[in-house]
Image (spheres, rainbow, N blue to C red):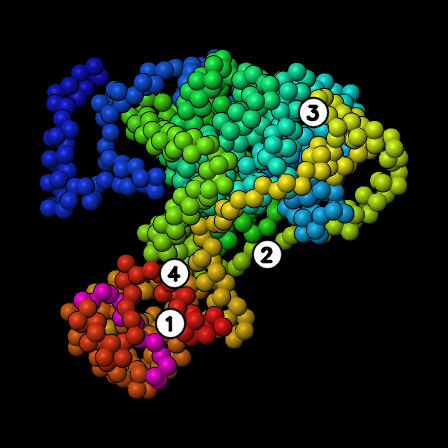
Amino acid sequence: MNKDTLFTEFSVPTYEQWRAAAEKSLKGASFDAKLLTKTVEGITLQPIYRKEDTERIPHSADLPGVAPFVRGTKAIEERQTQSWYVSQEIVANTAKAFNQAALHDLARGQTMVNIVLDRATAIGLDPSEANAEQVGDRGLSLFRKEDVEVALQGIDLEKVPLYVEAGALGLPILALFIAHVEAAGKDTAKLCGCIGQDPFNELVTAGKLPFSVNTAFDAMAQSTRWASKHAPQLKTILVGAHPYHQAGGNAVTELAFSLATGVEYIQALLERGLSIDEIAPRIQFSYAIGSDVFMEIAKIRAARMLWSNIISSYGGSAESQKMTIHARTSVWTKTVLDPYVNLLRSTTEAFSAVIGGVDSLHVSAFDEAIRPANEFSRRIARNTQIILEQEAHLSKVVDPAGGSWYVEWLTDELAKKSWELFLQTEEKGGMLDFLKAAAPQTVIEQLAKTRSSSIEQRKARIVGTNMYADVQEQSLQQETLPAIYNERKEALASHRAEKEQSIFAKQLEQLAGTNDNQVELAVKAALAGATIGDLSKAVSKSDQVETVIQPLRLHRAAEAFEALRKHSDIFLERTGKRPAVFLANMGPVSKHKVRADFSAEFFAVGGFDVIREHQFASPGDAAKIAVQSGAAITVICSDDASYPDLVPPLAQAIKKSSPKIIVIIAGLPDAEQLASYQSHGVDDCIHVRTNCYQMLRQLQERIGVIS
């Protein structure tokens, strides 16, 4: 066999020939209905893609490292020396606990320190100013330079990059970290990573800022100007798209609204005297990565392309056009039920992020939706990244998706739709005005409703939650971080007693009275003992003009079905048994099995105990055993042809013996037939188009599971 002539004797079919063969195999079914797929982004996917689909795409011949950077910001030779940063979030609420976890993980494959701040720190409050639930809640409590020193003891920030989401104001948190670096005798010019301010993230999440947006932008300008001179490798501006994702948005909304946010930040800083080449290199984007593998790959690629075009329009250099992207696997897709399935979800999401070409990545722990990650779950999540890099060798290939006709077409199509929404946002005055008008919130809410409806009807499947549920699974033990509110208040009081406030009062007064050199003044104050609360008040200049909008509703896709299961679990605790469903399987297996399987799965996702081991030949026998079972619900399972003879006597017999039993048939009879069955005692029917969630909730309410 000659490899050079292999397959040459076979003719290459045209698309028309392939389609004709495909339509023939469908045996009369609609080609469009069967083989075209509509995504939540409104993009229609074809069953096959060809070279012709990419011929008009302008970037299809570009190389990696070349604007507009669809194929990545690193040139071919750079890719061999630097893969992405393994940037696992470390969730601990005390500096000592954080330090122990960070040193442990850095020694085992983590390459970037990712600090999650507690709520009080993120909004610039000292422990005494915050509510108890804001201090140490799923994040690190820092109010002084000494806390940073303990948290980062033994970690050289000249060598290890840092990632911190620094909240709406940013500068006070930046000052604490810079104070630590200077106190340790380190060079700020060697700092790498991101201590990023993101006021719009706080705004869309909480619904308000405790100060005006201009105050936030003033602080952002100060931090950015300082970093461009003293820490050129450090990002000070963060654009987080996570809220749009976690509220139920899609790739189009995430891209459009994050790009519009980035443009709003640029405009604000240009007005404050910075140049585009000072601003753009200080910006980092952060995206959540969902479960649609190819859409998420396209999202990252499209983001780079669109951002490059935006910075180019401002006159930014090719280097400034490079987008830096941090990603984390989705919160939206994770489940409390069957949590080990989250390992698989995170793996596919991490794969998409890596193939898309992110710069740093957090892979969520499988128990993230239940409790703070422990050493075991952190290790599994971290090793997911390391396997992709070192065993799957994904870092050795430059733009693995490049050249795929499907991925290139999808990237271009997603970019077009995102750009259209971005332009609509700009035409309405920009992102802030758009948010004040609640337009993005409305768009996201409608998308979330559509996605929820699909989940409730089980068109969109969540394995282990709304499909293939394990009712007998043992829940993971819930854990919380230790309560530290009182301890932190005492630490603050002790700190106040030890530090002479007059030493740093002058710096705070200067900080509040000037818009120049604010970072230097804040660092000096932090070195002298000023706290996060002190710095925040000075930087905000006691600005009391709140910025208020309608917030997004952040949630997970599985929450509705998890609530059903929770109700059943509580019922079990209260009564000693789960709510039960009896399957009246009528006739031979060939007649009832398909619908019995469907019914068992339908009720299992609501936490019902399904009794299905019986098989009956007569309605009388079935009614007798159904009543004896004690189940509050009976589902009749057979084929349509048998129902007219079986359903009326069976339903009547059940209702006569126990009127409270709910009788349901599996299947979808026509309206006239259903009305006839209902006249004999049938309450309802279930079928593939039934809204599973709504039906199960109604049934739980009727039988007293939900009181």
Q: The N terminus appears in which quarter of the rendering?
A: top left
Mark 3 vs mark 4: give the one in front: 3
Q: Earlier in the sequence, mark 2 or mark 1?
A: 2
Q: Nearer the viewer, residue 265 or 71?
A: 265
Residue at image point 63% right, 28% down: 218
Residue picked out by circle 2: 477
- Identify the secondary structure beneath mark 1: strand
In the picture of the structure, the residue carrying the numbered disc 1 is: 581
* 1 or 4: mark nearer the eye: 4
Q: Are marks 2 and 1 in contact (CB under 8 Å)?
A: no
Q: Is residue 30 left or right of residue 417?
A: left
Q: Residues under labels 3 and 1: Cα distance?
A: 69 Å
- Is 283 or 597 nearer to us in this picture? 283
Q: Which mark is residue 693?
A: 4
Q: Main secondary structure of the magenta part?
A: loop
Q: CA distance from mark 2 to mark 3?
A: 50 Å
Q: Earlier in the sequence, mark 4 or mark 2?
A: 2
Q: Earlier in the sequence, mark 1 or mark 4?
A: 1
Q: Which residues are magenta?
A: 658-670
Front-most of residues 23 and 280: 280
Q: Secondary structure at mark 4?
A: helix
What residue is shown at x 31% (from left), y 18% (from top)? 58
Q: Which mark is residue 515?
A: 3
Instruction: Check disc 3 and report its element: helix, strand or loop.
Output: loop
Q: Is residue 25 visible?
A: yes
